[in-house]
Image (cartoon, grey):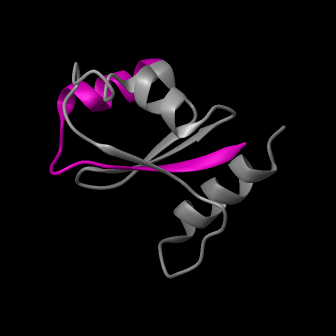
Amino acid sequence: MTIFAILTPSDNPQLEAALTVSFYTNFLKVGPGQYLVASKGTAVDVSNALGISDGTNGNGIVLTTSSYYGRAGSNIWEWMSVKVSAP
């Protein structure tokens, strides 16, 4: 699967509810307004599924990742490792 980064200006309960419905086991909240989503679709597909494209659930940016690196909690690295290797 591909990992997408979802960035919003602040916490958004509507968007978080949409994440829970559309990507129940495939999203991780990283911080306020920051989420990771694992999906086989495109950034447009993720944006549409979350109601970002049409503004239904507020504003946000959906970024596709091709690689990742940095420092974060082990739960984040473990989640990404599992999702990237999922069929």
Q: Is residue 55 above or below residue 34?
A: above
| One can see residue 4 in this view | yes
Q: In x, y percent, where is residue 5?
A: 46, 52
Q: Residue at x 69, y 33 (%)?
A: 40
Residue occupying the far right of the picture: 87
Measuring from the top left, give residue 44's x and y in whole percent: 49, 32
- Magenta span has 72? no
Left or right side of 61 for 43: right
Looking at the picture, how far across and down is residue 32, in whole percent? Answer: 23, 54
User: At 42% across and 31% down in the image, what residue appears?
Assistant: 47
Tell me if residue 16 is in the magenta stretch.
Answer: yes
Q: On the rendered image, what quadrant is the N terminus found in?
A: top right
Residue at (73, 52) in percent of width and height: 84
Q: Is residue 24 visible?
A: no
User: What residue lies at 67% left-to-right and 46% top-to-bottom?
Assistant: 2
Q: Is residue 31 left or right of residue 79?
A: left
Q: Is residue 15 left or right of residue 37?
A: left
Residue 46: percent from left, percent from top:
49, 31
In the displayed structure, 9 sits above or below 19; it is: below
Instruction: Work out whether residue 34 or residue 63 is closer to the camera in this orientation and state it.
Output: 63
Q: Quadrant of residue 41?
A: top right
Which picture quadrant has residue 48? top left
Q: Quadrant of the C terminus?
A: top right
Describe residue 84's horizontal placement relative to residue 45 as left or right.
Answer: right
Front residue of 44/77: it is 44
- The residue at the far bottom in this view is 71
Q: Which residues are magenta?
A: 1-21
Q: Is residue 36 above or below residue 73?
A: above
